[in-house]
Image (spheres, rainbow, N blue to C red):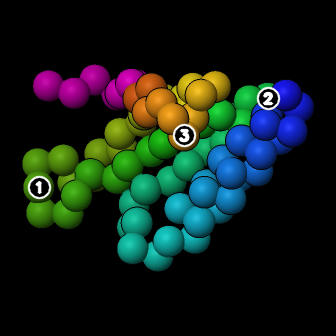
Amino acid sequence: MADREEWREMRVVRELDRVESDQSLIGVNFLRDLNDIRHFTVTIDGPVSTPYEGGIFKIDFLLPETYPLAPPHVRFITKIW
């Protein structure tokens, strides 16, 4: 069972490293939770030339234990109207 958990952790780290190095994701940042590899906060800058320009939108992002077989749990921290 530990091997499976280690494999999941390595996959999460590898995928997050790939996303963080993706130059096409301008204005998207990931803050890793040092205590839980599956939990992090995402911030998205408001798109230029929209009413959201200048805004920073925070999202709570949690990968379930069964990831990648189950989708992530995503919740906006910033109020969206």
Return the residue at label 2: 35
Real-space Cα separation, disc 1 to disc 2, in angstroms = 36 Å
Return the residue at label 1: 50
Would you say the magenta stretch is mainly helix, strand or loop? loop
State the image coordinates of residue 8 (x, y, percent, origin top left): 71, 41
Relative to 45, residue 69 above or below: above
- In the picture as drawn, the residue positioned furthest to the bottom comes out as 23
In this orientation, does residue 27 appear?
yes
| Horizontal side of residue 9 vs 65, given as left or right | right
Task: Give yes or no for residue 80 being in the magenta stretch.
Answer: yes
- Residue placed most toward the observer, 63 or 4: 4
Region rendered in magenta: 75-81
Dot 3 or dot 1: first in sequence order is: 1
- Residue placed most toward the observer, 47 or 34: 34
Residue 78 found in image quarter: top left
| Horizontal side of residue 71 vs 31, given as left or right | left
State the image coordinates of residue 45 (x, y, percent, origin top left): 34, 53
Look at the numbered disc 2 and give the secondary structure of its residue.
loop
Relative to 17, residue 59 above or below: above
Dot 2 or dot 3: first in sequence order is: 2
Of tags 3 and 1, the one toward the viewer is: 3
Q: Residue at x 61, y 44 (%)?
A: 31
Dot 1 or dot 2: first in sequence order is: 2
| Horizontal side of residue 78 vs 7, given as left or right | left
Return the residue at label 3: 68
- Residue placed most toward the observer, 67 or 14: 67
Relative to 46, residue 23 above or below: below
Q: Are marks 3 and 1 in contact (CB under 8 Å)?
A: no
